[in-house]
Amino acid sequence: MKKILFSFAIILLCTISMMAQPPGGPGGFPMPEVKCDFDPYVEAPKGYDMDDLNISHGTIETVEYKSTTVGTIRKATIYLPPKYNPKKKYPVFYLLHGIGGDEKEWLEGGAPNVIMDNLIAKGNAKEMIIVMPNGRAQEDDRPVGNVYLGSAAFANFEFDLLNDLIPFIEGKYKVYTDRKHRAIAGLSMGGGQSLNFGLGHMDKFAYVGGFSSAPNTKMPEELIPDVNKFRKQNSLLWMVCGTADNLMYNSSRLKAFCDEKGIPCTCIAYPEGKHDFVVWRYGLYNFAQLIFKK
């Protein structure tokens, strides 16, 4: 019995060590360094994530949708752009949280509404609807207890996203329903989900981003099995990770693969950046300016 318990403990520790830290944590365990050609880091302007009272503001609302995947009613946070017009069509950006968060994490720590209001006011980003779901697709989707043991629920979100959430959003709001008007990105565990689901379903997503992506990220050969197909379908593959974040391996590994295959890909090393919202806000600020413009 002792041998069985010891073996289970070792397996559990190995499983945990392969997963991302919660938001605000040290950023994972040491991983091999992968050399790649990072893209230039350009500092974001001061005040990019500060509320400007002199511009129009978007609105935040919470929606509930029926998930056939989970068998429950689930929630998502929605950002509607300034002067939202229900009769106008908008592109949709799915923005995912980390392993220790939920549908409120971005709103509580990432100021997505503030960043988007400022970008739209300056004409630097397209008007868009942002959907911030709960990426933990299980009956009790609260970030409680040992969040590291919920990896299966994060993988299961792929089906909840495609079969339940996207159809709900397209039924509730007047939005474009083609891949050219759909983007996905996320932080940490959500970054891995975004790369896995976005690149795994290029018929659904034209723009894919990963901010400090976690070890749930699939191997590059799995993400991009067909280089020619990727070149034809993907409009943007964009990543960022802090140089002080031990999860850099997941981003640099994919960037190195893309460089070797001649695949368009951006990966920025945020100077001294850790596994936190300083890097993730920067990621959202840059990614949002690049999507829906092709």
Image (tube, rainbow, N blue to C red):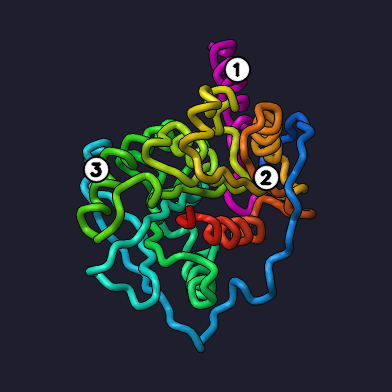
Q: Are marks 2 and 1 in contact (CB under 8 Å)?
A: no
Label 3 – label 2 distance at C-alpha:
34 Å
| Residue 283, image quadrant | bottom right
**Residue linked to disc 3:** 67
Q: Are marks 1 and 3 in contact (CB under 8 Å)?
A: no
The magenta stretch spans residue 143? no
N-terminal-most mark, 2 or 1: 1
Q: Is residue 285 above or below residue 256?
A: below
Mark 1 packing: few (<14 Cα in 10 Å), some, or many (20+)?
A: few
Helix, strand or loop status at disc 1: helix
Tell which tag, 2 or 1, sits nearer the viewer.
2
Tell which tag, 1 or 3, sits nearer the viewer.
3
- Going by the image, does 58 lie left or right of 276? left
Q: Is residue 224 above or below residue 251?
A: above
The magenta stretch spans residue 16? yes
**Residue linked to disc 2:** 267
Residue 97 locus on image (x, y percent): 49, 50
Q: Is residue 146 in sight in this rendering?
A: no
Q: Residue type at mark 1?
A: Phe
Q: Which residues are magenta?
A: 1-25
**Residue linked to disc 1:** 6
Mark 2 packing: few (<14 Cα in 10 Å), some, or many (20+)?
A: many
Q: Residue type at mark 3?
A: Ser
